[in-house]
Amino acid sequence: MNAPNQMSRMTSGQPAAPADPRQRGVIAAVMLITIGVLLLIAQVFQLGWLSLLVMPLLGVAFIVWSIAARMPGLMIPGGILAGLGAGILLMTQPFVASAENELVPAAVLMLSFAAGWLLIIVLTPLAGGRLELWPLIPGAVFAVLGALFWMGEPGMRILQIMGTAWPLILIIVGVGILIGVLRRNRQQGVS
C-alpha cells in the first residue's frame, strides 16, 4: 500500500493496515524470550518476587504487541493479564495485606481486574480497532464486586441479598422477554 493511501485510511477513521507478518513473529519471539529469561533468573537466584511480575509483564507485552502489529484482538488478553497481574502485585503489598478488613486484598484484585477491562476499551483504538464498549460489562461487574468487598461486612450483606434476589430478577426478565415475543407473534399472525 502506498503512503498516500495509508494516510487517507488513517485520517478517514479506518484502521491502518496490519504490520508485516514477519514483524509479528519477531514481536512474539521477543516476548517469549523475555518472559523465559525472567523466569529463569527467578529460579536460578531464588527471586520469588520476580515471578509476581510475569503476569503484568505478559499483559504489557500483549498490549505492546497489539499496538505494534496493529492486531486489536491481542488487546483482550493484554488488558486481562495486566489487570489481574497488577491486582496480584498490589495484594502482596504490606498496606493491602495488613488492612483491617480482611476482604481488602480481594477488593484490590477485583478493582484491578476491572481496570484491565477498562484498558481494553481505552487502548484498542490505538491498535487499529474500533472503540468497543462490551468490556464495560465484565468491568462493571468486577468493579461492583470490588467495591462491595472493600465495604467489608455491609458489602457482604448486600452480596448475600443479591445472591438471593438474582434468580428472581432472571425470572422477571425472562417473563418480560416471553411476553414481548408472544405479542410480536400475535401481531404478525393478525396482520
Image: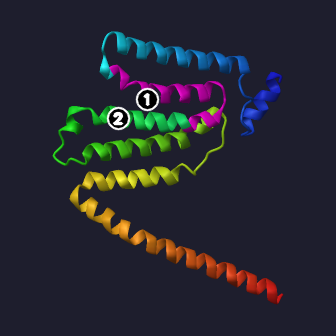
**Residue beneath label 2, please?**
88
Relative side of 59 to 85, left or right: right
Span colored in magenta:
50-76
- Quadrant in which the N terminus appears: top right
Secondary structure mostly taken by the magenta-highlighted segment of the chain: helix
3 shown above or below 191: above
State the scheme by which the image is colored. rainbow
- In the foreground, 13 or 71: 71
Q: Which mark is residue 186?
A: none
Residue 65 location (% of width, % of height): 59, 25
Task: Give yes or no for residue 66 being in the magenta stretch.
Answer: yes
**Among the two numbered marks 1 and 2 on one chain, the one whose residue lies closer to the N terminus:** 1
Relative side of 51 to 30, left or right: left
What residue is at 36 percent from the left and 70 percent from the top? 164
Task: Give yes or no for residue 158 being in the magenta stretch.
Answer: no
Q: Which mark is residue 55?
A: 1
